Structure formats: C-alpha cells, structure tokens
Amino acid sequence: MSLYAFLVYLIVFPSMLVGQSISGVLTELADKEIKLEGFNGFKTYLISSTKIDKTGKFSLQYYHSDYGVGYITTSENIPFLVILSNENVTIHGRSLTDTASIAITNGKENQWFEQFAKERAKREQAMSAWTYLEKLYATDPLFQNQFTPIKAIEMEQLRLTKEETAFSNLLPQDSYLYWFLPIRKVVGSLANIAQYRQNEIAQTIQFLREIEYSDQRLYKSGLLKDVLEGHFWLLENSGHSPEAVTKEMKISIDQLFKKLANHTKILNEVTDYLFNLFEKHSFFEAAEYLSFKALSDGSCTIDDDLTRHLETYRTMKVGNTASDIQFDRSHFVAENKSESSLLKIKAAYKLMIFGASWCPNCKTDYPALLEKYELLHKKYSIEFIYISLDSDKNQCKEFYNSSPFITYCDGKGWETKAAKDYHVFATPTYILLDKELKILSKIQSPEHLEAWLQANGKK
C-alpha cells in the first residue's frame, strides 16, 4: 500500500484502527482477570482481557469490527451484556454478580439498554399478572360479567405494551439498540406467548420469518441461536397437529434459504445448527426436508462431514428401498445363525439396529429390545437384525452372546459396510423395513417400535 493510500485509509476508516474502551471500577474484584468477548454467529471470541488493579479499576478495548453485542465476564462466570456500538463505556459497581450495584455512567446506548432491561423485567411481571387475571375473569363463574375490572385489565395491558413500544421508538433509528431491542424483546417473550398469549403466535412467527438473517447486526448480536431455536420451538408449541407443525417448519426453512441465498457462509452455519437442533428434538421430517434443500441448493456448499450426515435423510428417506446386506456367516455372534442376506430373511418386518457394546444408550435400550422381541416377533412376524459397530469381536460376543435375534459383527467398527450403506452416523440407529426392504419408519426407541406396530402393523 502506498503512503498516499495509507493516509486515505486512516482518514476514511479511523474507527477501524482506533479502539473504544469499556472501563470502570468493580470494587470487589480487585486483582481478578476480566474479559470482553464478542459473538460471531453461534460462536464467541475473545476481544480483549486484562487484570483489574488493586483499587478495582479496569479498561478493555474493542474495535469497529466488534460492532454488535459483547459480554464482560470474570472468574464469577456471570456474563454482563454490553452494546459495542463505537462508544466509550464506563461502569461502576461492586461486582458483576451484584447487578443492583452496577451503574453505567458513560455510553448512551448502554445506558438506554440498562434502563430498558430494568423496566422490561418489571413490565413482564406485571403483564403476566394481568394475563392471569384476564383468564380468571373470563373463565371463573365467580368473576364473570364483572365488566369494570375486565375493562381495566384490558386497558392496563394496552398501556404497558404502548409504553414499551414508545421507549423503542424514541431511540435514534441509526443506533444499534433501535434494531436490537425488538428482536430481543420477542425472543424473551416466546414462553409467555406460547403459554398465555396464544393469539399472538401467528404474528410472532411471521415476525421471526421476516428477520433478515444475513444482517451482520444479527450475526454479531448473540441472538442468532436464540432466534432460530425459539422460532422452531414456537412452531412446535403452537397448538397445531404434528402434520401442521411440520408444514409450517418447511415454510420457515424455505424462508431461511431464500433470505440467505447469497450468503453462503451464514447459510452453511445455519443449516448445520438447524440440522442438529431438529435431530435433538426428533423433528425428523423437518431434518429430512432441510437435507433435501441443502443438498440440492446450489448456494449451499457444505463440508464433507455434514454432507454425509444429510445424505442419510436423502438416501434413507421413508419410502425408499434400503440396500440388501450380504452376511458372512463367520461374523454372526450366535453360531447357529445361517442367513445369507437381509432380503432372504423371512419376516414381514425387519428392524435394523446399529449399536455397540461401548455405546451407553445402546446398553440402556438393549434390555428393552430383549423384553419386546419375543412378543413382537410372534405377533407381527418381525425380525431384529443387530449390526454391531464394535471393533473388538470378543467384547461384542461377550455382551451380545445371549441375544435371541440376529446379531452380526465384522469387527470393522464404523467401517462396517452395512453402516456405510445405511449412512449410519450415530448409535443406536433404528430403521424399520418391510419384507422387501422398503423403509417404513425411522424408529427412535424400542417403545416407539412397539407403538408403531400397534398403530400400523399387520398381525
């Protein structure tokens, strides 16, 4: 870079080079380490750290690239949120755990944020109380037809809502807080909306769908995880049927892909996070739909590990036909087994179980499988085929030797061909097939298998 260009850079982008400070006094934290961390999507990173001096004074630096939300933390591990909006901030108090002692004496956006947080907590408590009374007066015969208090409750709820909106509207529109507060407010209200204010669910879901997920302000806010998790949690708890919930989740996934179409990095991170979220909460249809979107969308360049994970849903989709498995008889745990292939096993239903003796959840499920096998085998003509991913065949045989159903272990662990063909990435994995190896269901547990057969199985 030439000297002239460098001087222009200094003039045009001074805040990129000159940091702002968060400083002050925390009298009860003398000689303690203090850190300032920021957010990048779902992750945090260290911005700066220092040691508080003997009088409690400290000073932390941050820069324009940190614009968003950060948090201060000490050995107490109680995070104290701060707005990093290119202003110097001064904090005085005893410690971060003693929030009543904390006062922000410099930094307008942080002073507004402190005021909002304190007032909002009180308003939320009041709103919950008024909502409880509203239901009581509407449903309890003792209080019904009391029109004067009912009207008063309605008016007070309206006043509280308008007061909070008015506070946000008074903020400068170019301030970070003006953008941040409405989203934070909705995220913090989701539980109350689902439980007490169901009439607001539809508009809240629409609000969450309309958020610009590519906005760097969101990426740096620490809210990305909460917004996504809250979005799909509210859909799950919207009071609709499972089929309707799944339909709404697909609409939300479509909206996310549309908004992030030109933002590959964020799209990949969001896809990865949502996929894990859906699996954690057993939203298997949503996970399947997400996998199709990610694998067919040209703007989503996902890494190899996630690709293999997503392929499980595309290849092993309910309705597809699973691969046949050729058995080497020397790998059967019980020596009296002689089946040559999965397809040749004579049974109306075939439950594929991928597990291992070292897997804690497999050990928990195994007694239930033993308990249910005889009854379900006779009642529904179902056969269990347990593919062990143990690398130690002796350890496998010791654990599964008394198994009444087909148990197979070639000692190759995750390299077992059947595990690769069935795109298995976790244990235990249960896949229910019909006699022709058509995939009928992704089973979650032995209890789920029994419930599925009771509802859908032919005796």
Image (cartoon, helix red, strand yellow):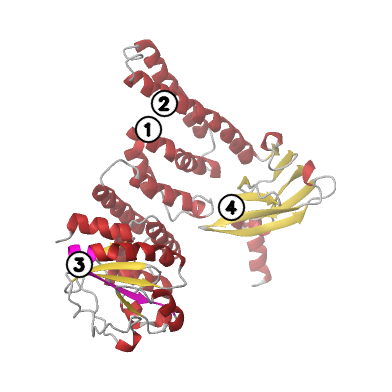
- Measured in 3D between alpha carbons, the distance from the residue under mark 3 to the one under mark 1, in whole angstroms, is 39 Å
In the image, what residue type sits under mark 2?
A: Thr
Query: Which residue: 50% across, 49% down?
Result: 223
Q: Distance between the residues labelled 2 and 4?
A: 37 Å
Q: Which amino acid does label 3 sit on?
A: Gly
Q: Mark 4 points at which residue?
A: 67
Query: Which residue is denoted by mark 2 in the rendering?
Result: 131
Nearer to us: label 3 or label 4: 3
Residue 452 in percent (x, y) is at 24, 57
Residue position marked by numbered label 1 in the rendering: 197
Q: Are marks 3 and 4 in contact (CB under 8 Å)?
A: no
Which residue is denoted by mark 3 in the rendering?
A: 319
- Residues in magenta, as a range: 376-390
- Label 2 Cα crowd, 10 Å radius (few <14 / some 14-19 / many 20+): some
Q: Is residue 383 magenta?
A: yes
Name the residue nearer the viewer: 140 or 104. Answer: 140
Mark sitting earlier along the chain (2/3): 2
As measured in the structure, the alpha-carbon distance from the residue carrying label 1 to the one carrying label 2 is: 8 Å
Q: Residues within 10 Å of mark 1 (few under 14, many from 20)?
A: some
User: Magenta includes 340?
Assistant: no
Q: Residues within 10 Å of mark 4 (few under 14, many from 20)?
A: some
Q: What residue type is labelled 1?
A: Arg
- 424 or 59, which is in the foreground? 424
Name which of mark 2 and mark 4 comes first in the sequence: 4
Which of disc 1 and disc 3 is earlier in sequence? Answer: 1
Residue 299: tell me if it is visible. no
Question: Disc 1 to disc 4, how far (Cα)?
Answer: 34 Å
**Which element carries disc 1, helix, strand or loop?**
loop
Label 2 vs label 4, nearer the camera: 2
Give the amino acid type for the residue marked by disc 4 in the picture: Tyr
Task: Indicate the secondary structure of the residue bearing disc 4.
Answer: loop
